[in-house]
Amino acid sequence: MKVIIIGAGTGGMCLAHGLHRAGIDVAVHERDRTRTSGLHGYRVGISPNGARALKACLSPELFATFVATTAAPYDTLAMLTERYRTLVRISMDDLPHSGDGPEDREHNVSRMTLRQVLFTGMEDVITFDRCFSHYEQADEGRVTAHFEDGTSDTGDLLVGADGASSRVRHQYLPHATHSETGLVAIGGKTLLTARSEALLPDVVRHGLGMYFDRRGQFGITHAVRMPWGTDGGPREGVGASERELVGRWPGLRFDNTTDYISWGITTSRSLAPADTLDRTGPDALALPTELSAGWDPRWLDLIATADPGSTVGLSIRTADPVPPWTPSTVTMVGDAIHTMTPGRGAGANTALRDARELRDRLVRVQNGETELLAAVGEYEDLMRRYSSLAVRESLEFMNDNGTARRPVVGPLSVAAQRTALRLVDRFPPAKRRMARGFQKVRDSELVAS
Ligand SMILES: Cc1cc2nc3c(=O)[nH]c(=O)nc-3n(C[C@H](O)[C@H](O)[C@H](O)COP(=O)(O)OP(=O)(O)OC[C@H]3O[C@@H](n4cnc5c(N)ncnc54)[C@H](O)[C@@H]3O)c2cc1C
């Protein structure tokens, strides 16, 4: 059996490792020109769903390297007002978890670091600078992927892991559409120093901060502390075994290892200027400052001192529900089939779970325990179930219906929400329920069990 994967992103690479380790012939085709091309964002939270998938698919040494190269874990998740008043503070210890292994907890990851870890040892499997254009399915069960450079590759299964604008999905399920949520997000990065750390509320200096303003806008901050010091060597306090991995990790030379604060603001298109997504550099940086006029002056300072080149804007889209389809020699993982809003931080984690579920079933095909199409169908049935929950929950968290901006009703609803959150903060059972709600799509197996 030969598996062709389009896209060397989170889901595609995790699957490729899992298949490669199981002795299945696998080829990954990636449109980026080199392993260091592209800006793939700054930070991603890997949940137990994602960590379990990485543990199942990577070699034990590479999984240990993944763990060793993550940023310092968070102690807190807090919701605050735009004036830095705490509404709810949840300790990371309050989040339910199924065990004590590194695969049972949250990891704070620099995206480029994860990408480089996932490329490690796969030099013979990935072809860069290979942009997929279309595929052809032959009657006898073979499938051929065609690329823009005129080359092609033939195998038994084609996996579209080519992200939200997937060409594989466009051809295979043209009716699987996306909708705009009416929201845009602008994010950036400020170097983490003693000065910039002091611009964060105390409660989230080692955690995740979510800020809600009176116009229905939503801000976020992450303090990302990498395990390398300024000399590029492992930082003081990194444990002995991890020290060795961090020190000799081959991907290190490709990565940005500096500590930073990642921040973002999500707003309604009705509040953002029409050219929001076209702006770059200082013009782009002026935008979050304008949108958050009236926020705490420390927030404004955090944005003002950001690296202008780090600012990115994106339009937030979500996948529309798709009715089940008949399995064939083409399938998909990750954003290619279930793009979701970043609301629950579940996109990459769901892509990783897809990779693990599909890998498990393809290994059974390889062992002669099941047929390929039955395995693909079983994977797709399960994937549709957990991913539709994740898409729905992610949309609910980021669904701006404009209520906050309506006269009279708006201020009342904001005040009611803030009071409700403050009450939750005072009652431990309510707080535990909220923490469990957060984990619903991040540790879906735990919540399902
Ligand atoms: C602001 C923001 C914050 C987020 N935070 C989180 C978070 O905290 N936790 C979380 O779980 N998720 C998060 N996500 C979502 C997460 O980034 C995505 O869901 C995840 O990267 C999807 O992985 P993937 O493997 O499906 O696709 P990707 O990682 O996007 O990979 C797709 C790959 O396919 C390649 N490709 C595309 N087209 C072609 C082609 N034609 N030919 C060849 N190659 C191609 C691309 O170059 C890329 O390498 C966030 C998203 C955003 C926007």
Image: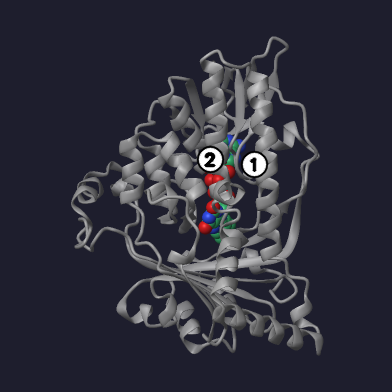
The structure residue drawn at horizontal position 49% and vertical position 53%, both measured from the top left corner, is 47
Spatial CA distance of label 2 from label 1 is: 10 Å
| Amino acid of disc 1 | Ala
Marks 2 and 1 close (CB-CB < 8 Å): yes
Q: Nearer the viewer, residue 106 or 192?
A: 106
Q: Is residue 264 in view from this perspective?
A: yes
Q: Is residue 80 in view from this perspective?
A: no
Q: Quadrant of the rendered structure where residue 275 is? A: bottom right
The structure residue drawn at horizontal position 74% and vertical position 80%, both measured from the top left corner, is 404
Q: Nearer the viewer, residue 392 or 436?
A: 436
The dot on residue 322 is none
- Residue at which label 1 appears: 336
Q: Position of residue 380 (x, y in %)?
A: 67, 33
Q: Quadrant of the rendered structure where residue 152 is? A: top right
The secondary structure type at the circle numbered 2 is helix
- Residue at which label 2 appears: 11
Q: How is the image coloured?
A: one colour
Left or right, 78 with respect to 423, comes to left
Q: Is residue 255 above or below residue 417?
A: above
